Amino acid sequence: MLAQEPKQLMVGFKAVLNGCDDTPFANDQEKRACENVLTKLTSEELEGAACASYAYWWMTKYDHGMSDEYMQRAQHAMALRECRRHYIGEGKKCNKTLAAIKEALQYRLEYDMESIRSCIAPFEDFPFASTKTNLKHEKDGSFITMEELKDMILDELTNKQEMVVRGHSKEHSAILYKHTRTARTEETNPQAYLYANIYIAERGLAVNEFLSLGKQEKLLVIFNFRQYNSANSPPHHLHDIMTKMMSRTYPERLAKLILMEPSLWLRVGYKLVYPFLARDTRDKIAFLPNVQSEQRKRAVFGHLVDPEQATQHLLHDGKLTSPLDAKHFVMNVPFHQLYDDVPLVQ
């Protein structure tokens, strides 16, 4: 990976923290409610909530030269942002919000998301990283090393299901691409599957922070179902585990979900549940059955993405034309940057 000087990164992440007080509350009542929830967290929980921000988490690992007062303000502001997302997700119920935050923090510890964030970066980027994680192998209970965690994620993203963060929307939402899974169901390593999906979600959110200086919190997610085969789907129980963990850990993080070339059963299933979905949820989901139709592509993507930030899968005149190489993305592109920020050398 192309390591960046900590001082260079610090400038960008400091810019994020400088604007972190601008939490997008709808009104003062929402802010007071979330402030009240934060008072019920322990100091460790408050720090954990703040570390949902990649920028804040990264800054806590270095001799950043910021005052204690500055970092305490940043901690409070980032924890408040995390609280607001849960507050909205829980229907603005304070008791449910508090329970949701605590459950999300438990997931972050259980899946050792700090190690997932840092396992592939070079030592120069994360000199604090240990050689071991707090994760354990399911088979024998031994601790997973950072190298093993890196290999799990790399294998999943390069050999089983390519996923990258490439381009951004007009609203500066990073675009997270998930391509059709190619590994057969029985070849799925449950732990690798979960860790890789956490990894790509964390990268997308880190890109959002850096790209928008903390203003954009939501991702544009695109699933490409081209050549989908049900024999390659992960086990249903594993998908259920991931869905529950993701929905709890990342509330209010989805700007829009676009399903390209979805299978017939998926379209039929969606029509069946459509009447029961909240309007906000409906508005976040779009289907693109025919990717060859430029008119249909324009209808779905034209108002979301400029050609300069689109691949030709999205728009025929998309300018992001270099081949997809997930290994390049994982190994060469810094965690908080988009796929095309580092040119692919062929």
Image (tube, rainbow, N blue to C red):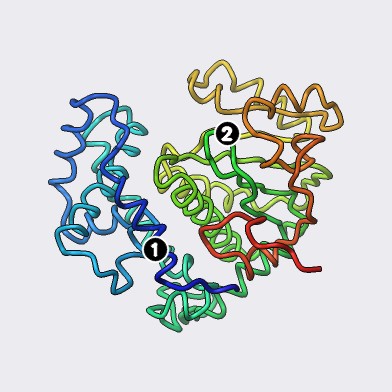
* 255 sits to left or right of 315: left
Disc 2 target residue: 170
The residue at the point 84 percent across, 45 percent down is 227
* 91 sits to left or right of 124: left
**Image coordinates for residue 204, horizontal then vertical, percent:** 53, 51
Looking at the image, residue 87 lies above or below residue 183: above
Q: Quadrant of the C terminus?
A: bottom right
Q: Amino acid at mark 1?
A: Glu
Mark 2–mark 1 distance (CA, rounded to whole Å) = 35 Å
Query: Residue pushed farthest top?
Result: 275
* 12 sits to left or right of 72: right
Disc 1 target residue: 110
The residue at the point 51 percent across, 58 percent down is 336
The residue at the point 66 percent across, 20 percent down is 271
Q: Amino acid at mark 2?
A: Lys
Foreground of the two, 120 or 42: 120
Q: Which of the 4 quarters of the picture holds residue 114?
A: bottom left
Disc 1 crowd rating (10 Å Cα; few below 14, some 14-19, many 20+) is few
Q: Quadrant of the N terminus?
A: bottom right
**Image coordinates for residue 311, horizontal then vertical, percent:** 74, 43
The residue at the point 28 percent across, 28 percent down is 92
**Disc on the earlier residue, 2 or 1:** 1
Secondary structure under tag 2 reads: loop
Looking at the image, residue 29 lies above or below residue 204: above
**Image coordinates for residue 240, horizontal then vertical, percent:** 54, 46
Foreground of the two, 342 or 148: 342
